[in-house]
Image (spheres, grey):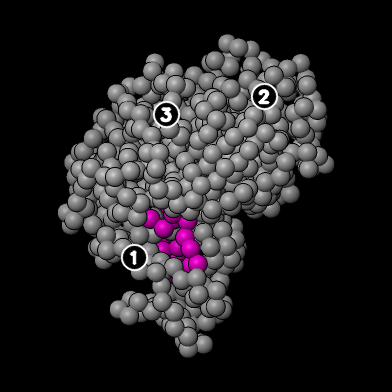
Amino acid sequence: MKGKTWIYGDNVNTDEIIPARYLNTTDLKELSSHCMEDIDSDFVKKAKRGDILVVGENFGCGSSREHAPLSIKFFGISCIIAKSFARIFFRNAINIGLPIFESKEAASEIREGDEVFVDLNLSKIIDLTTDKEYSFTPFPDEMKDIIEAGGLMEYVKSNQFKG
Amino acid sequence: MVMTITEKIIAAHTDLGEVRAGQFVYADVDVCLGNDITAPIAIEQFETLGIAQVLHPDRIVLVPDHFTPNKDIKSARNAKVLRDFAQKHQIKNYFEVGRVGIEHVLLPEQGIVVPGDLVIGADSHTCTYGALGIFSTGVGSTDIAACYATGKVWLKVPETIKFTYTGQLNEWVSGKDLILYTIGKIGVDGARYKAMEFGGPVIESLSMDDRLAMCNMAIEAGAKNGIIAPDHCTEVYVNDKAQRGYKFYSSDADCNYFETHEYDVSALTPQVAIPNLPENVRPVEDLSDIRIDQVVIGSCTNGRISDLRIAAQILKGKKIHPSIRLIVLPGTQEVYLEALREGLIEIFINAEGAVSTPTCGPCLGGHMGVLTEGERALSTTNRNFAGRMGHPKSEIYLCNPAVAAASAITGKISHPGLIT
């Protein structure tokens, strides 16, 4: 994962990521055309596929709407680096296979427009613009299994969902 | 091993015997809830699995309450997805318009969720049912789809923060004020990933409607669940409603809490959350010059009969301020009928308020009271994020039903004590 960063602050909520006026559809193309609309109405014009969101505390707080991480994923954002995630957004991202990383240091220091690379093998976030490296909070093994399967539906299909 | 009530209920839904905070488990789900916004995605996901039948049709609940009666063609299509799925899989707990109510008012009222249950819902306010001593948490559509197939959910057992409330509540101070006050103290991520366990003498004397309002807003502090140990009040509430057997759990005396907070709430006055976060809480008397355009009384937080009673008590024989639009939404058809029988609906209409069929509608800017640019609402709902009720440049203040009713009369945010 390598891309240009866009920075947003603390407590970005799901109403801002995808306002309820668009929740009358499940069409991913339509949802992604309104991604981040109420926090930054220019987002879909200026951001590009592969870009990275770098955000503050409690990202994705509010509603359980999976439309929020889905709109970000299908817009083409490659991953989100946050100081912290709200819990339903966190599990939704794991379940739909949207890569997310928690790193207070990285999310504090990375500047908008920096080129950032996430090395999954080394578990490192690397800011190529400033040449700084950051680690991120590792996922528990059970969550890693879901992520590696490509999301919860794939995990269920592969009969790994134990229960 | 000593456990919290949350740990005990999760443990009882695994074959592990005991669980501890931080542990990753797969738990059996008693009730799996979806609505007309979240269930269509769950149904699409489930259908990718190629499984002919859901595992437990009797544990699935489908409540089309957000954009119903259908507000537009796309919403009608989503509602049809639920209707068709319910029919195909013989899901009896599907609630058509005319029978439907706001999910978190409806499920406890109908005895579909009962003490000791483990409940997941693709709606963040699923934490409401904790008021009945249920482990209940909001999840996403894909979690629901997996549960349709497997009957289970993956969970990380949460640590618990214990909140103890002491003292005597003032007149006009309710469960809504207690939870707003608490969120004001700990912040919108103060209980992130945690269980919020509410207790103490004030909670013991609180009505079930007020307890439901408190647990409803646990998510607004970032919590996984809110929970109150069942007691006599719970027994009275559930014994003629429960559709299944139930079990009361409570935390062990020496269990491990992540944090404990004790609040003496004797001096507490009605609380108001100002834009744009539920943590921006002020006593109502500090906000007396805030003019408003719209007042909403209802929602999964405050759409129950006792909420309507207190609003009607204040509005009786009065007219709302000429510049105010008042919208009242009974939470379910049963609440609506009871309000009719008690003459409350007549009071609202005589006061020149609009009364709506049960729907989540205005709370999330869906329909039945969407705001335009620059407008300000005072609402008994649970979230005041910028633009949630409509235009991104509209504002929401959150309060209890008494403050909402009093303010509808004066046209500005007012203490109910000034009216009666």
The chain letter under disc 3 is B
Give the percent coordinates (x, y) of residue B293: 74, 39
Q: In which quarter of the image is the N terminus of chain A?
A: bottom left
Q: In this view, does B389 lie above or below A46?
A: above
Q: Which chain carries label 2?
A: B
Within 10 angstroms of label 1, few (less than 14), some, or many (20 or more) residues?
few
- The disc numbered 1 marks a residue on which chain? A
- B100 versus B198 height, above or below: above
Contact? badges 3 and 2 (CB < 8 Å): no
Q: Which mark is residue B230?
A: 3
Q: Distance between the residues labelled 3 and 1?
A: 35 Å
Position of residue B407 relative to residue B125, above or below, is: above
Q: Disc 2 or disc 1, which is closer to the eye?
A: 1
The Cα–Cα distance between marks 3 and 2, rounded to whole angstroms, is 28 Å
Q: What stretch is highlighted in magenta?
A: A71-91
User: For mark 2, does the 10 Å Cα neighbourhood hold few (<14), some (14 to 19), or many (20 or more) residues?
Assistant: many
Q: Position of residue B178 (x, y in %)?
A: 60, 37
Q: Residue A139 carries which label?
A: 1
Disc 1 is placed on an element classified as loop
Tag 2 residue: B311
Q: What label does residue B416 carry, if any?
A: none
